[in-house]
Amino acid sequence: MESNTRKRLIIAVDGPAGSGKSSASRLLAERLSYRYIDTGAMYRAAAVAAYRSGVSVENDVALEQLMKDVVISFKSGRIHLDGEDVSRAIREPEIDGLSSAVSARAPIRKALIALQRRMAENGGVVMEGRDIGTVVLPDADIKFFITASAEVRGRRRYTERIERGETADLEEVIEAMKRRDERDAQRELSPLVPADDAQVLETSSLNLEEVVDRMMERAKKHGI
Ligand code: C5P
């Protein structure tokens, strides 16, 4: 009875790379039995599509057509491109760089933002990205902006790479993180800034459970 009357909210989560927002969003969605939507994975899938079809990131006409021709979707939490599970392909190093370039292009953002809005329209979602609370879903019920210092985020990325057996230089990773922050905050389309009504969570000294607990506290105030 109670579950039928519970509100199905729209929760927007934004923040920079390495802030832990993906893990926190996934866990929050799990606790609430909501759908988790990783919009970064959608931009990465668009980059895979551009890469495979040989479309130049400079060519807006071709990018617009590309977005009409491909289907990007989630099935059981995994990202699919034209029905193919590309969850691994989107994490390849060449896609890292390309996704950043692709995500700055207007035809790509226009198509993916429209798709993201459709995915959220029935509520019961935790949507995570860079511009969810500001551009995609400005009317979201709850907005979080999750951040941490560049040093902490750089160290997390560094540890991930070492654990994957890759080589990395900590100072370089931190510097790259700062450069990316600056680029993301200053870009023309959907710059990375907290929405005015977002709750900012500085997570440098918090673990994952503590972050999700704070998000749950806020969600409970909304009658979840
Ligand atoms: O978060 P992730 O690294 O997977 O994002 C991939 C790329 O997509 C990044 O370059 C990020 O800036 C971009 N992105 C975006 N808008 C979003 C989500 C991700 O521009 N809502």
Image: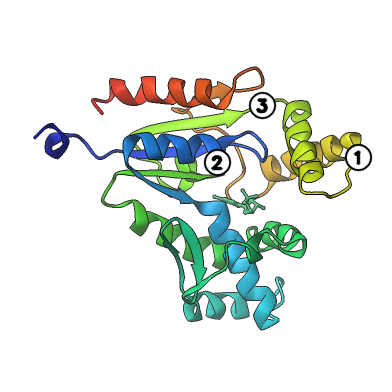
Mark 1 or 3: the one toward you: 1
Q: CA distance from mark 1 to mark 3?
A: 20 Å
Taking depth in this image into account, of 65 and 5 the one nearest to the observer is 5
Circles 3 and 2: CB atoms closer than 8 Å: no
State whether label 3 is within 8 Å of ligand 1. Answer: no
Taking depth in this image into account, of 136 and 19 the one nearest to the observer is 19
Which residue position holds label 2? 22
Residue 148 numbered mark, or none: 3
Q: CA distance from mark 3 to mark 2?
A: 13 Å
Figure label count: 3
* In the image, residue 80 above or below residue 210: below
Which residue shows up at 62% across the image and 29% down it? 147
Q: Amino acid at mark 1?
A: Asp
- Give the class, few, some or many, for how many residues have Cα within 10 Å of label 2's Cα (few <14, many ≥20): many
Residue 140 in picture, x, y percent from top left: 36, 39
State whether label 2 is within 8 Å of ligand 1. Answer: yes
Residue 158 in picture, x, y percent from top left: 80, 38
Circles 1 and 2: CB atoms closer than 8 Å: no
Q: Amino acid at mark 3?
A: Ala
Residue lying at the far top of the rendered structure:
205
Mark 3 or 2: the one toward you: 2
* In the image, residue 160 above or below residue 152: below
- Give the class, few, some or many, for how many residues have Cα within 10 Å of label 1's Cα (few <14, many ≥20): few
Residue 117 numbered mark, or none: none
* Mark nearer the N terminus (1 vs 2): 2
Q: Amino acid at mark 2?
A: Ser
Taking depth in this image into account, of 209 and 118 the one nearest to the observer is 209
Which residue position holds label 1? 169
Which residue shows up at 88% across the image and 44% down it? 168
Q: Is residue 192 left or right of residue 116?
A: right
